[in-house]
Image (cartoon, grey):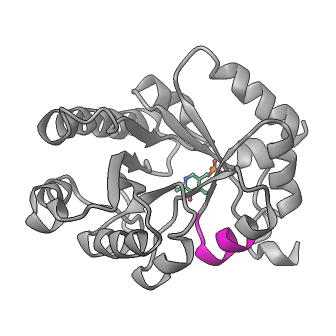
Amino acid sequence: MSIADNIKSLKKETANISVKLIAVSKTKPVEDVQAAYNAGQRLFGENMVQELVEKYEQLPKDIEWHLIGHLQSNKVKYIAPFISMIQSVDSLKLLQEINKHAEKSKRVIDCLLQIYIADEETKFGLGFDEAIELLRSAEYADLKHIRIRGLMGIATNTDNEKQIKDEYYELKTFFDGIKQSFFRKESSFDTLSMGMSADYKVAIEQGSNMVRLGSTIFGQRVIKHWKNN
Ligand SMILES: *Cc1c(COP(=O)(O)O)cnc(C)c1O
């Protein structure tokens, strides 16, 4: 199926449930992003700052770009003027840096706290306790140019569906608790980003309202360096 067909069938699949679809275009050429755009897709996710900036410059300006990969503090300045959402906030220090550059751009940047739920050493993210500590801190209370919209999590890369289900269940439970404790009066705390190509159906069953799909839309990623495509 073509990229356009994939977008259309995913839109159909999610038509009756309130789940936002992020098309993860990392490593894929701008032509592929444009094809998805032409099929009506407007939300795109990237995990590398340089690739994101170059695609932003070449593509239509009504695209909403989401950063979904680990962000180094010294690179925040390149995306602060235009990014729609940073899903991969994993420290107070990073949040402070985002706030600083958002202020320079006269913006308030929407962010998700990335929560560590996988049984793997390599995934970034805050532990449950660390997220609570961040939200309780006086430093966080001072930040006026970021807005925490919710949480993001990546499940373990495994065939064990029960394990994935348990990890997403745990994140949904945590999300509900955080909403109740810290954002009861803020309706903008509304986003639970969980689910990738391999596990998005399980994620939706467990309460996800934002899925990040790459290979389901664009095909497998074989080439690592998108510019050499
Ligand atoms: C690459 C990536 C995705 C999409 O992965 P697919 O398996 O291709 O759907 C989703 N979320 C994050 C954080 C990613 O890095």
Asked whether residue 65 is drawn in magenta, I would say no
Using residue 217 as the reference point, say whether residue 78 is left or right of it. Answer: left
Q: Position of residue 124 (x, y in %)?
A: 38, 66
Quarter of image, res 188:
top left
Which x, y percent locates residue 7?
A: 77, 34
Q: Nearer the viewer, residue 128 or 188?
A: 188
**In the rendered image, the vertical position of residue 2 relative to residue 10, given as above or below:** below
Q: Is residue 52 magenta?
A: yes
Please report the residue visible at 74 percent of the width from the left and 40 percent of the height from the top.
41
Q: Answer with the quarter of the image where residue 22 lies.
A: top right
Instruction: Give the total of numbered labels.
Output: 0
Q: Is residue 115 visible in the rendered structure shown here?
A: no
In which quarter of the view is residue 150 placed? top left
The prevailing secondary structure element of the residues shown in magenta is helix
Tell me where residue 89 appears, x and y as whole percent: 37, 63
Q: Which residues are magenta?
A: 47-54
Determine whether 110 is above or below 226 in the image: above
Residue at x 19% of width, y 33% of height:
185
On the image, the x and y values in percent for residue 48 come to: 60, 72
Locate the N terminus by quadrant. Answer: top right
173 with respect to 107 (left or right): left
Given the current orientation, which residue lies at the most extreme bottom position?
74
Residue at horizontal 80 percent and vertical 45 percent from the top: 37
